Image (cartoon, rainbow, N blue to C red):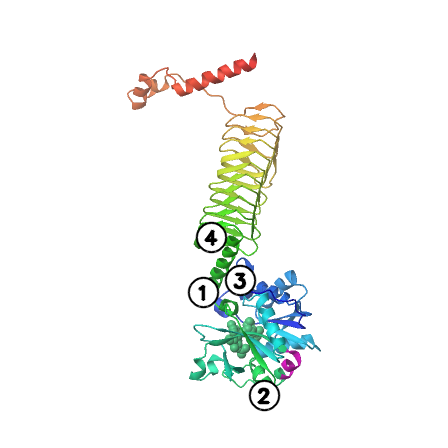
Amino acid sequence: MSTTPAQAPVAAVIVLAAGGGTRMKSKSSKLLHPVAGRAMLSYSLDAAQTLNPDKLVVVVGHMREQVEALLEESYPQATIVEQPVRNGTGGAVACGMQALGDINREVVVTYGDVPMLSGETLAQLVATHREGGNACTVLTAVVPDPTGYGRIVREGGQVARIVEHRDATEAERQIREINSGIYVFDSAVLRDGLANLEPDNDQGELYLTDVLGYARLHERNVGAYMTDDIWQTEGVNDRVQLARMNAEVNRRILEHWMLEGVTIVDPHTTWIEADADLEPDVTILPNTQLLGATSVATGAVIGPDTTLRDVEVGENAHVIRTHGELSVINADAEVGPFARLRPGTVLGAHGKIGTFVETKNAQIGDGSKVPHLTYCGDAFIGEGVNVGAGTIFANYDGSHKTPTHLGDCVFIGSNSVLVAPVDIGDGAFVAAGSAIVEDVPAGALAIARGREHLSSDWVLRKRAGSAAADAASDSAGEIHSAVAEARAALREENQEDDQ
Ligand code: UD1
Ligand code: CA
């Protein structure tokens, strides 16, 4: 699309958001249902904002508390107006105009439930309106199935009026050019037109569309801007349409990132939400969802089978079959497969969170590794640490959560439990199978387990004649060669160290 020249701002945008949304069959307002991770209504407001209106008015009604909460939080500049009775689009705009008071110039009317409508399209609509010297300009589209929409009735090519599907004749129903419900009005014509509306239609409502007929009656120009991207005029009324809309928005988001240099191996199973941010040369493998404000730096590989929400992934990191939330994975780190990163996880550069590891509120220093079968919660881990397989950070005593601190270059032997709060100093070692309840000073070795006790020939005495006893008598005294060799090598190394 050609770049739109900078435009003088319009006087106001009125966003209609009072409708019922009953076909969603939901406890939450239709307008809060997410499209690509953001509330449907926020798209309309963001598009409206691009016009730099002097005033932004949102007309609320159905489930207004929910809608107002979103507006107050994210769009404090919006003026909220209640439509007390749902008497039609004309009634809704009249409420908005009342709140605006004495204004002139243009008023744009749009809906809260058209998430794909872009600011560019709104700008084109305003430009068309100005070029034509129009009193009203409507955004239209030619669609394959116009059922339910208002139809654009043209006379000699000019827009004459809009007729609702239910009020239309059979001949009018053949028209495939539909009213999107998005318009620019001259504010004086809009005000007069609204004052003259009558509910003389099948629904007994005040139809905003009748303002166009009013303008024509007073020999004012009514124009149209037709978009060929029909998705931009598409509303969401039920969850079937919501799913279709999400699929299309996702398709466009993926296309955008691919054109920005991201490899997406399987677009059909990849979901990237609107607020995610990716750098060129990222690779996304199948079945991956990048949700919320997730960001991925160049060279990183994500997936397959990975869901990240609000996770920051550094350069060249690899994240495989992982579920992560509110976490940071630094450059060149490795995560997964089968890892769960809960909020507050920070993995240092070149670090590792491996298979069947769950982390929560865990800071893991550069080059530190938690490779297998570990729960690591409320942990502060220095650099160059190795946490052995099956280690548990016991951070909860039934009533309190407390932290565990590991200094730099600590070694935790497999199957240890670190009972918080506990501090293990720099370079300290914990022997495999230990239950650590007291601090371990820097450089110490802690062994906290029962000694091995041997009852020689117990099987031969107590299980005589069994397969185990037969096996034992055949190999009495033998040690497997691999173990024997490893032990000899260790012994040699220790002797060298002692010299
Ligand atoms: C309206 C148009 C129709 C157009 C269609 C596009 C009229 C009379 N008809 O149809 O020509 O093709 O939109 O989707 O305008 N709303 C309120 N208060 C109300 C009624 C509606 O705020 O009292 C809001 C709704 O929340 C929604 C929008 O207005 O955002 C459209 O309402 P909806 O009932 O969906 O439109 P239709 O009347 O079917
Ligand atoms: Ca609708």
Please report whichever mark, 4 or 3, sits nearer to the chain's N-terminal start. 3
Say which residue label 2 marks.
Answer: 217
Please report whichever mark, 3 or 1, sits nearer to the chain's N-terminal start. 3
Say which residue label 3 marks.
Answer: 33
State the extent of the magenta-drawn residues as a range.
186-192
Which numbered circle lies on residue 216?
none
Q: Does residue 181 lie above or below 462 as drawn?
A: below
Element class at badge 3 = loop
Residue 454 shows in the view: no
Residue at mark 3 to residue at mark 1: CA–CA distance:
13 Å
Q: Nearer the viewer, mark 2 or mark 3?
A: 2
Residue 475 shows in the view: yes
Element class at badge 2 = helix
Residue 40: x, y in percent? 55, 63
Please report whichever mark, 1 or 4, sits nearer to the chain's N-terminal start. 1
Q: Are marks 2 and 4 in contact (CB under 8 Å)?
A: no
Element class at badge 1 = helix
Say which residue label 4 marks.
Answer: 270
475 on left or right of 385: left
Q: Are marks 4 and 3 in contact (CB under 8 Å)?
A: no
Q: Nearer the viewer, mark 4 or mark 3?
A: 4
Image quarter hosting the C terminus: top right
Mark 3 residue type:
His
Say which residue label 1 marks.
Answer: 240
Residue at mark 4 to residue at mark 3: CA–CA distance:
20 Å
Residue at mark 2 to residue at mark 3: CA–CA distance:
40 Å
164 on left or right of 55: left
Residue 189 is a magenta residue: yes
Residue at mark 2 to residue at mark 1: CA–CA distance:
40 Å
Binning the other alpha carbons within 10 Å of mark 1 as few (below 14), some (14 to 19) or many (20 upward) gives few
